[in-house]
C-alpha cells in the first residue's frame, strides 16, 4: 500500500480526467492521498475533493509564492477547516526565494510562514513545508519558533544531506518524490541514503516533477512506483519494505487519517 502525502489534484491540469483518475487509485495500491492547498482559492477545492473521495484528505495552507490577498480572514477560514476530521495538515507553507529577490517580499513570506506555523501549533496539526532557495532562512526561522514542537515534513526536499540531518533531529520527515530518479539528483540520492527510512515520506507533487522514465509529462500518484523502486535500490530494501515503512511513517505524522492496515 502506498500513501501519497503530497499532490495537487485540484490543479487545472486534471480538469479532464480528475474524477476517473482519483477513483481508480485505491485499486492500484494508492490507498491514501493528501491533496495539498497552495493558493487561497485551492483551500476550498482541496476540501471539496476530500469530501468527495473517501481515500482523499486535505491540507490547508498558502504557498509562499501565492500570498496575494492573504490576510487574517484566510487564517480564520483555515482554522475553521482544521476542525474537520479530514483536514490533516497545514500546508503547503514556507519560503520560496527562487522568483522573489526583493527584501520586502521575502519578509512578507517569512511573516506568513510564521503565522501559519503558529496556526498549526494552535490547532495541533502537522505542517507541510515548502522551501526553495531559502535554506538558511527556513532553518533559522524554524529554530527560532521552536518548530520541533510542531510535527511536519520538508516537502520535495532539495537541500544537502547534512541539512536533512538537522531537520530529522527536529523530528521532521523528508518528502521524496520523482526528482530522486533524475540522473542529476546526486545530492537527493545521498540524502535518501543517509536519512533513516523511518523519516522518509512518499510524494509526487502532482502534476509536477514526474519521475524517470516519464520526466516532463504530467505527474500523478501512479508514478510513485518508480520512486519506491529507486528508494529501495538506494537503501538496499525491497519495494514492499519501502511501501510498508513509509505508510507507517505517514500514518504516524498525519494522525487524523483513518487508520488502515
Image (cartoon, rainbow, N blue to C red):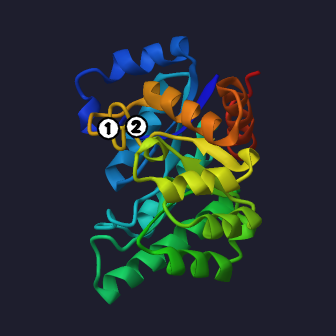
Tell me where residue 53 appears, x and y as whole percent.
49, 22
Q: Is residue 17 left or right of residue 170?
A: left
Percent x, y for residue 188? 53, 55
Q: Is residue 59 left or right of residue 253?
A: left
User: Of helix, strand and loop, which one carries label 1?
Assistant: loop
Residue pictured at 25% horizontal, 35% vertical: 13
Q: Residue drawn 74% across and 35% down?
A: 245
Look at the picture and state if 130 lies above or below 51. below
Identify which residue, 192 or 223, lies in the foreground: 192
How crowded pointer 2 is (Cα within 10 Å; few <14, some 14-19, many 20+) is rated as: many
Name the residue: 35% across, 15% down. Answer: 20
Which mark, residue 38? none
Q: Quadrant of the C terminus?
A: top right
For this rendering, which residue is in front, 120 or 168? 168
Q: Which mark is residue 211?
A: 2
Mark 1 = which residue? Answer: 215
Q: Is residue 128 above or below residue 26?
A: below
Please indicate, yes or no, whether residue 126 appears anywhere in the rendered image. no
Report helix, strand or loop for mark 2.
loop
Could you say where residue 208 lies in the image, as x and y percent from the top left? Answer: 34, 43
Q: Quadrant of the N terminus?
A: top right
Circle 1 Cα neighbour tier, 10 Å, few/some/many (<14 / 14–19 / ≥20):
some
Mark 1 in CB contact with mark 2 (< 8 angstroms)? yes
Amino acid at each position: 500500500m502506498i500513501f501519497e502525502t503530497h499532490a495537487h489534484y485540484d490543479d487545472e491540469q486534471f480538469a479532464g480526467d480528475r474524477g476517473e483518475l482519483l477513483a481508480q487509485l485505491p485499486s492500484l495500491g494508492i490507498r491514501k492521498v493528501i491533496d495539498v492547498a497552495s493558493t487561497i482559492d485551492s483551500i476550498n477545492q482541496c476540501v471539496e475533493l476530500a469530501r468527495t473521495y473517501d481515500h482523499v484528505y486535505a491540507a490547508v495552507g498558502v504557498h509562499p509564492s501565492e500570498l496575494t490577498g492573504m490576510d487574517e480572514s484566510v487564517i480564520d477560514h483555515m482554522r475553521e477547516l482544521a476542525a474537520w476530521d479530514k483536514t490533516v495538515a497545514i500546508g503547503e507553507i514556507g519560503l520560496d526565494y527562487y522568483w522573489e529577490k526583493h527584501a520586502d517580499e521575502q519578509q512578507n513570506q517569512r511573516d506568513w510562514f510564521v503565522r501559519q506555523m503558529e496556526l498549526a501549533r494552535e490547532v495541533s496539526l502537522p505542517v507541510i513545508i515548502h522551501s526553495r532557495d531559502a535554506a538558511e532562512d527556513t532553518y533559522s526561522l524554524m529554530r527560532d519558533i521552536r518548530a520541533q514542537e510542531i510535527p511536519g515534513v520538508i516537502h520535495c526536499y532539495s537541500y544537502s544531506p547534512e541539512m536533512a540531518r538537522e531537520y530529522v533531529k527536529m523530528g521532521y520527515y523528508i518528502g521524496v518524490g520523482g526528482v530522486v530518479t533524475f540522473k542529476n539528483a546526486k545530492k537527493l540520492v545521498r540524502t535518501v541514503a543517509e536519512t533513516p527510512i523511518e523519516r522518509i515520506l512518499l510524494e509526487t507533487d502532482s502534476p509536477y516533477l514526474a519521475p524517470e522514465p516519464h520526466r516532463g509529462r504530467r505527474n500523478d500518484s501512479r508514478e510513485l512506483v518508480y520512486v519506491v523502486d529507486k528508494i529501495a535500490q538506494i537503501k538496499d530494501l525491497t519495494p514492499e519494505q519501502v511501501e510498508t515503512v513509509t505508510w507507517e511513517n505517514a500514518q504516524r505524522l498525519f494522525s487524523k487519517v483513518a487508520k488502515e492496515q
